[in-house]
Image: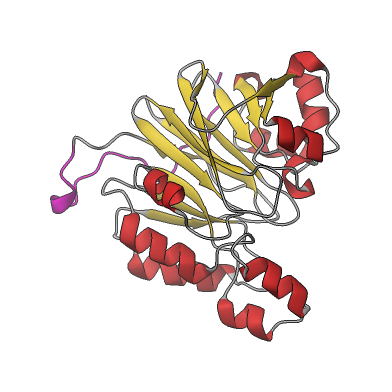
Amino acid sequence: MPLFITSLNSGSNGNCYFIGNDQEAVLVDVGISCREIERRMFRLGLSMNIVKAIFISHEHADHIRGVVVLARKYQLPVYITPSTLKSSPISLEKELVRFFTAHQPITIGGLSVTAFLKLHDASEPHSFIVEGSGVKIGVFTDIGTPCEQLIHYFKQCNAAFLEANYDDTMLEKGRYPYSLKKRITGGKGHLSNKQALDLFIQHQHVFMTHLILSHLSQDNNCPQLVYNLFRKHANRDINVVVASRFQETSLYTVRNNSFKDPINGITAFSKQASQMTLF
């Protein structure tokens, strides 16, 4: 059974990532409004009925802005750490709050979600691996540096949402004050294009099929620049996508193609799912 993935929004104005099969799905972060999530999922032919849980990476507003309204409307459990909850303005009924611990998988129907700590300037920030039917999807954004844990999990991914936040030259010459530039580049801020590219080149899974470049800076990056950079270094079977800060990406299908021969370029995946309604 394949997994379906899309970025519903990605950037400092809001982040939300959808991963699911044809029966259940999870959202990683809800940084845009409930209404926008509904609209964007509808345009993709996705039903909110299959969303079974929300996972929160950290407490910054662009990752939690819409979570309370969405969780209450659809009675969705919100998986979060105690420290992140305490550091956030999230106020939810106890029955909707679930705590998670790093490296302890959580089962959501046919999906398994595993969190691990990342380097970011938040109270207890985590990245996630979502697995189903042997397919592994990584959500790796808001990362200061590619630590050993990130490398360990990135190597396993058939597809990944990977942060490529800024171009070094654009940030250096840009309008941001020195203190903000130091925060971004200081090891607990964001991944640069170069850091993300090095991770991709050195550690990509031999059967990776989709790379969705995420959380681009509006001021210090350029979608076309990022796409060209990664496309040049990706083999022809990898679908490189730049996630938008204004709209959803297409819905992509990711299959376990490990039984195929990558040397001969034979793979088993659909680069883009057709418009469909998933129940």
Magenta stretch: give its range.
260-279
Q: Tell me if I can see residue 21 in this picture.
A: no
Residue at x-position 33% and y-position 53% = 204
Residue 150 vs 97, above or below: the answer is: below
Residue 200 x/y as whole percent? 38, 59
Q: Main secondary structure of the magenta part?
A: loop
- Please tell me how many numbered marks the rendered image carries: 0
Residue at x-position 32% and y-position 61% = 202
User: In terms of depth relative to the viewer, which is nearer, 25 or 272?
Assistant: 25
Q: Give the quadrant of the C terminus.
A: top right
Q: Give the quadrant of the N terminus.
A: top left
Residue 114 x/y as whole percent? 49, 31
**Taking 135 as reference, is 216 left or right?**
right
User: In terms of depth relative to the viewer, which is nearer, 144 or 271?
Assistant: 144
Residue at x-position 82% and y-position 30% = 68
Residue at x-position 36% and y-position 70% = 232
